[in-house]
Amino acid sequence: MSADWSWLFLDAHGNPMEGEGLTTTGFPTQSDAESYLGESWRELLDAGVEAVTLRENDAVVYGPMSLRAAE
């Protein structure tokens, strides 16, 4: 299986983020990508990520989606 699914991490201004603690590897399925997010969203917030966008290859599947609870 190929790793076609990936997350784009966004800061508070909507700018893409990269760096330590942010995965750069893809996932073989949408379910695997979403499971990763479900397990890691708190750590991502701690790293400064405010929102994420799910991509399949270069196509946006959904997002940006805030990592913060709705008020």
Image: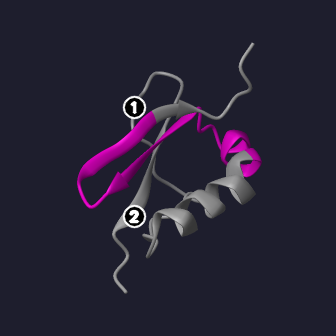
Q: Callout 1: helix, strand or loop?
A: loop
Image colouring: one colour
What residue appears at the point 55 percent right and 65 percent down from the top-left corner? 31
Return the residue at label 1. Answer: 15
Is residue 26 shown in magenta?
Answer: no
Residue 21 in sight in this render: no
Residue lying at the far top of the rendered structure? 71
Quadrant assignment for the C terminus: top right
| Identity, as a three-letter code, of the amino acid under mark 1 | Asn
Residue 51 x, y percent position in the rendering = 54, 34
Q: Which mark is residue 5?
A: 2
Q: Which mark is residue 30?
A: none
| Mark-to-mark CA distance, 2 and 1 | 20 Å
Q: In this rendering, would 19 be left or right of 62?
A: right
Quadrant assignment for the N terminus: bottom left
Q: As displayed, is residue 34 above or below residue 54?
A: below
| Identity, as a three-letter code, of the amino acid under mark 2 | Trp
The one nearer the camera, 44 or 30, is 30
**Magenta residues?**
42-63
What residue appears at the point 43 percent right and 76 percent down from the top-left corner? 28
Residue 65 in sight in this render: yes
Tell me if label 2 and label 1 are in contact, CB under 8 Å. Answer: no
Residue 24 x, y percent position in the rendering = 45, 65
Q: As displayed, is residue 17 above or below residue 26?
A: above
